[in-house]
Image (spheres, rainbow, N blue to C red):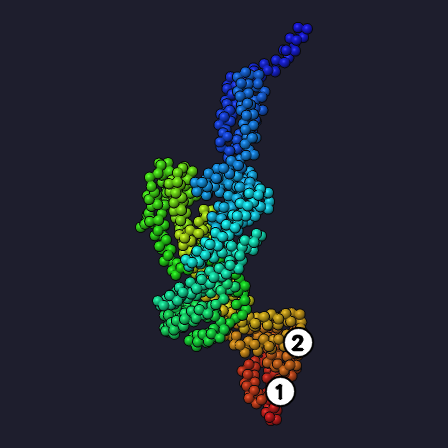
Amino acid sequence: MLKRFFIITLFISIPFLSISQILSETQRKDVILDIHKQIEILSKISSEKLDMIPVYKYQIQTSNNTLEKYEIYKSDNQIYAKWFELKTLVKQNNEMIEFLEPRIGNWFYRKAVGAMANNDKIMASELLNKALVYQPFNVMANYELAKISLDSGKIVSTTNRLTNIISKMQPDEEEKLLCQNLIAFAYDMNLLKSMSLMNQGKYAYAVDILSELNDFCQVDIYGICNKSVVKKNLDFCKTGIYKDHVEISKKAMSIGRADVAGEFVQNTYDYFQRNRQSISDTSSFDGLVRSVVDSYVNQIKNLNTPRNSEAKLDLIRKTKELIALVGGSYEEDVLRTLAQIQGTSTPVDMKLDSIENSVPNQGYTEQYAEYFKDSISDAEQNVKKIEQEYIPSSENPIPEKSLAVEQTKTKNLRKEIDDKFYESRSFMTVNNYDKALEVLETANRLAKIDVEKKEVEKMYTSAIREITARRMSAAEYAIFQGEVEKADSLVAKTNDLITTYKMETDPTIVNIMNSYLRVIDKKVCQKKQDEVDGFVYNILDCVRRNDFTKADQLINTAMQIKGSFECRLDKQKIRQLKRQIEKPLEYVNMKQNLMHKLSIGDTIGFIKDYGALEQFWNDNALWEMSVEHQPLRTLLVNMANDDLIIKSVEELVKYRLYFSSLEALGALKDMGYKRKQTKEAQKKIGMMMSLDLVKRSDKIRESNIVDDKFKGDKWFKYFYKSYKKELIEWQKKF
């Protein structure tokens, strides 16, 4: 029995002994070191850092993998000691995370409440959103987010979130009442705020709030909203904005700046066209247009020298655009006056107008309309001022409102925060804006007291204003360089930055964006005008090559080039070219139909249409436009069909088109026929032509043409003799 036990024990111990023998001392140390690293990692897991739980779970999983990997070395006492220590840590941390994970949402919510107590709404919003990742139906987290969005003036998103809480999250009675009260408060607060702005004459800002309220009124299920009051105030604000435009235009006129008034008139028209339902009385606008137009017309009359021809044409174009805003008999009268000044009349082309009007306006003023709150009389001058304040240059290395200057104004702060300000300023110097904001975010996390937080917030505001100005300046330069895609990207990035940091209503940001977008839009407009002028060159080239179909296509394409509402393109030359090619284009279409009939053997149709084609060419003097008109003789020779030519001659004689029949007969000559082969045909044509009953004056003209064309042509000898012989008989009778 003892022997048997010894054998069994020996067999059991053999695998462990073999493993121990296989491991060298170096290998043992490596295994122990690997396990120890995992122990160190797990020992740092803290219940105070719940936002790190996803990382902790990954670390625990890695440790589990390590335990499985080294389980075969448990017979080694040194390894087993470490292995068991790691296993214990894994078990303890697993239990802790299983307990904490369902409570992470509440933990983030409590942190957010603390951030709101310190008035750090950005951090609070971030923490609340993290809470909702773990607990999407956390009523109070959703409620606090609604309060934050309400502070940003977003009443629709606020009420949508509150309504969602009540309808889907099963709040208790107190929570439900809390949400309902906030909805009512949101409506009242925004309505009062809009009315305050209206009293201050800030209609453009009030419109944004009232538009949000109006949207809320459409989905109000609680009966809170007074739709009639909101609509009345909204209409009042839009009318106020319209009147402000008119007043600015009148002031411009009073100081003799009709050009500035003209630009404002266009903006005003575009505005009240978009808000027709709110603005009913436009009589003041019509009077203003008349004043500006009268000023323009007087200037046009005084621009008589060739040197001023371009300026004169530009004023005429602007005048026509303005009178179109009023229309009616007034437009007709002014157009008549302009026609008298120019010595010509310019008819309206309804087809081109429809092509142009079918294309929507495109430009920054449409894409970023939220920044066009106030009218700017001279955007370029405003941009120069912004550049002096924010954009560094060799003459102005530290602009007066840059982040570098703002830092010098900060109060004494802790060195860590002050260093971050300096670091952020350094990144701004090399145009690394993302890194600059990231460093400011770090400074924000370091800030502990209100003074520090306020200074960080000032740095944020200053940085975003400077970045906005710099990027918009770069976008303007990109447009100048012709890099439109780059400019679009820069403007979009700037807009995203402003939106991310909720600076859309910051007056300085709005002023920067408003000014730059107008200047950029104007430069884009100039590029589009260059594009239109390029089409003019290409159209003229097509006309020179008699490719009127291609010219018409280019004209239609050119008419579809549109800018923004503030971009007025001069397409007068395009319209003139359209009128110029109308008859040639009609001739080309007639000729195509003619050749089609010839190709299918419709001789009668061909003969009739050719006569009409030649008459059209002569009546409209198309030779003056170098429109190529192939004689019938050339057409028939190119067809190289004897039977077709003979049939054509017969049909032409039948319809008394004698000169055309001789042209067709000449085609046989060009194809190698002898005159004897056409003797009978020539005699018949000569006799019928000479005896044809026409006026004496026409007969004399006909005879002269016959002499000029056929007297010296021996191939037409039989025709000429027959014609002259019978002409004597005609003269005796008539």
Front residue of this view, candidates 360 and 700: 360
Which residue is at a point 50% across and 23% down the rendered structure image? 36
Q: Is residue 445 above or below residue 379?
A: above
Q: Amino acid at mark 1?
A: Asp
Placement of the N terminus among the 4 image quadrants: top right
Residue 61, picture quadrant: top right
* Farthest right residue in view: 1
The spot of residue 105 in percent (x, y) is 53, 37
Q: Residue at x 49, y 66 (%)?
A: 280
Asked if residue 533 can be seen in this view, the reply is: no
Tell me which corner region of the image, top left, top right, bottom left or bottom right, holds residue 290: bottom left
According to the picture, the residue beneath numbered tag 1 turns out to be: 692
Q: Which of disc 2 and disc 1 is earlier in sequence?
A: 2
In the rendered view, tell whether residue 730 sits above or below residue 175: below
Pointers 1 and 2 in contact (C-beta within 8 Å): no
The residue pinned by badge 2 equals: 604
Give the answer, above or below, for where 532 lies relative to 502.
Answer: below
At a point 37% along the width and 65% down the height, the residue shown is 251
**Residue 51 visible (yes or no):** yes
Q: In terms of secondary structure, where does tag 2 sit?
A: helix
* Callout 2 crowding tier (Cα within 10 Å): few <14, some 14–19, many ≥20: some
Q: State the SS at label 1.
A: loop
- In this rendering, position of residue 615 left or right of residue 384: right
Image depth: mark 1 or mark 2 in front: 2
